[in-house]
Image (cartoon, helix red, strand yellow):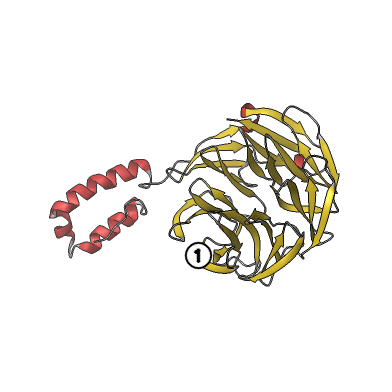
Amino acid sequence: MDLSLTDVTASALANALRDRFTTEREFGRAPLAACCLLVLALVGLSGSLGAQAEPPLTPISKRARATLVIPGSADFLVADGHAVWATNEGRIERLDVDHPRPVLTVRIPEPCGAMVVAYGSVWVASCQAASIYRIDRGSGEVTARIPTGLADPQGELSLAAGAGAVWVLSDSQGMLSRVDVARNQVVDRIPVARYSYAAVFGFGSVWVTNTGAGDAVGAGAVQRIDPGTNKVTATVPVGPQPRFLAAGEGGVWTLNQGDGSVSRVDPVTNSVAATIAVGVPGSGGDIATGHGRVWVRASKVLLTTIDPATNRIIERFGPPAGSGAVRVADDAVWVTAHDIHTVWVLKF
């Protein structure tokens, strides 16, 4: 009899045990049954074996070192030293925890998606121009605009940087564009699975999420691309509709919008090492790694933290405040809530 006690309720366990024996009398006399009945009693007290009790919501205001009120719609974030850049309406802005207002503003036509900071620059997608803008980190000067196309014209995407390139999903039919940072131009277009929108660089590779069958809730996957060959080297099935992803803390992590779970992909075996039921289904959201945690931003729960050593939820923050983003910058975690024009900074 192969029973996983962490996956069954008391009722399911009882039924399985009864099926193991031929009669009620055998069930009552069997030595195994006596032990299992004790287990059933314990299960009855605790609910279901192995079920994780959800931590209570901690008001984020109690943990925030700073709460910034940013006019407009501050949304996607990228770390830049101790500061961050945030997308906003018609601009991106550099935010610093010691300043109540943005310290630098750069005009960009409809900036969208998660940015990257690399090669001395900030790189951001423009949904209006279907291009990538390169911005000098110090001066805020726009130094290049690279037409690429965008797989998601609504902007729910992310850029990746590594191996001398910036990477963007540029066509919803399955295309990953490689931008050479020395030439500021697209030098390769790599076929990937359809409906791929978000990318991240880590463990020597580019990783992209495939959401499945368009907008339908279906099977999703993560694909791994070797920047040395520009070839897909692995396709890993994960949860339904994976969108945003992060690399770090020992794995590649996807936020699966179909069921609100998080999948952990082991970069050594190219397989799912864990699935964490975070319970935050729906569009939007974000995921990041750092400070020994995985951070999940969603609408249903403002912020959830996962311990990568145990793959268990360790803390939740509230109250809900619509969608937004999360990023780790030095010793702080930044969280946006664009619906209420608020940015929190948590110190660790």
- The image quadrant where one finds the C terminus is top right
Residues 45 and 273: in front is: 273
Q: Looking at the picture, how far across and down is residue 224, in whole percent?
A: 55, 63
Quarter of the image holding residue 61? top right
- The image quadrant where one finds the N terminus is bottom left
Q: Amino acid at mark 1?
A: Pro
Q: Is residue 40 above or below residue 226?
A: above
Give the residue drawn at x 23%, y 48%: 37
Q: Viewed as shown, does residue 138 lie left or right of 162?
A: right
Q: Looking at the picture, how far across and down is residue 100, in whole percent?
A: 78, 29
Q: Looking at the picture, how far across and down is residue 142, in whole percent?
A: 84, 49
Q: Viewed as shown, does residue 88 lie left or right of 293?
A: right
- Helix, strand or loop at label 1? It is strand
Does any portion of residue 71 appear in the rendered image? no
Residues 243 and 230: in front is: 230
Q: Is residue 37 above or below residue 258?
A: above
- Mark 1, residue position: 237
